[in-house]
Amino acid sequence: MAVTRIDIETFLSLDFQHPIIDVRSEGEFAHAHIPGAVSMPLFNNEERKVVGTAYKQQSKQQAIKLGLAIFGKKMVEMVEFVERLVGEQRGTSSKTVVVHCWRGGMRSGGVSWLLDMYGFKVYTIIGGYKAFRLWGLQQFENDYPIKILGGYTGSGKTYALQELKQQNATIIDLEDLAKHKGSAFGNIGMPTQPSQEMFENLLALELKNAVDNCRIMNAGSIDEVHEAGTNNVSSSIWLEDESQRIGLVNIPSTFFKKMRNKPVYFLDIPFEERLKHIVSGYGKGDKQEIAGAIIRIQKRLGGLETKTALNYLVEDNLVECFRILLKYYDKQYLKGLHSRENLNDLLNNIDCETVDAVKNAKLIFAHQIEKVNA
């Protein structure tokens, strides 16, 4: 079998059904990679540095000799690694893999030759990871049939978003992609955030999957899906209203601007109900982490309010502690909400009695149906 070179669109059409093997160094992979890819470095960080130095300071031929010496020692190990990887795919006897490096050059070429010679069916991505990266950035330039789920802090927007998904709506959970809940307290109990580049890769792929899902549900082209999305419940892609910055990562500016011009469905929930929800969640967190989060916003919160909130925290009076914080975040959210142009045309207010994801999702759908039938 010959190695087959495929462009990025063909790669994406394979729908990630075959193992994706990234042969870049572990450092390159850790920084960012194609979601779902597995790292199998041809050269580790130090080896890559040695080969690169030889290429620059001596010659291409000397660099190739060094690379071959390193590669030769790893050949059996690599073949066995890929055998295990393919074997872990249940329900298929396929021995097909996709191999890529940074630009689709010598690293992926060498590994692909080895795997092909051993008997695997091998695809390589023309342009490598760089091609995927360029494709990902292009996704943020497109327009989408987006609807924004809004509401003050403590409205349970993430839970409502997940409930919409349970009811067959298409969603993208930005906070899950960012591994952060979006406020100064958003990293409490969360894993390490991805790099900015990795976050963008994840978001780009989520956008593609969301469009594909809408297309399947509505059996139409992307243009037809987008047209239907202005009115049709099942044609919309739902996202939570976020600041552009989510912890250490940022929603790409082009895409964020598009989000700011989409309809907002605002869950209007009484303050005390939201306060109970916040206390039941963050109140279980580590006190030192909560204190650290309060201190991070002390310049904006004000010295007196910061001191008072910290004192309440020490006294285990979480209700009054979070009451201060919730009032602060309500002001911040309101400011962000009203910074939109044409807010009156975008805002859809949904009165909710409490933070109940199931009930509130039903109210959202009811509001949608009412708009369709209006």
Image: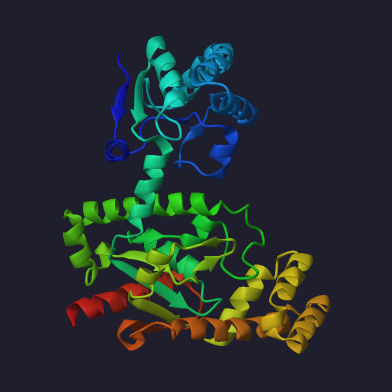
State which quadrant residue 312 falls in: bottom right
Above-or-below relation of 218 to 283: above
Residue 178, x across and y down, in percent: 53, 57
State which quadrant residue 273 falls in: bottom right
Above-or-below relation of 61 to 10: above
Q: Taking 370 as reference, is 147 left or right? A: right
Can residue 337 be seen in this snapshot? Answer: yes
Q: Taking 261 as reference, is 100 left or right? A: right
Tell which of 260 and 356 is nearer to you: 260
Q: Quadrant of the N terminus?
A: top left
Tell which of 195 and 66 is nearer to you: 66
Residue 160, x across and y down, in percent: 44, 68
Tell which of 134 and 348 is nearer to you: 134
Q: Quadrant of the C terminus?
A: bottom left
Tell which of 175 and 71 is nearer to you: 71
Residue 176, x across and y down, in percent: 51, 57
Q: How many marks?
A: 0
Q: Taking 103 as reference, is 177 left or right? A: right
Residue 344, x across and y down, in percent: 33, 88
Can residue 93 be seen in this snapshot? Answer: no
State which quadrant residue 154 falls in: bottom right
Identity of the residue drawn at 37% across and 30% down: 18
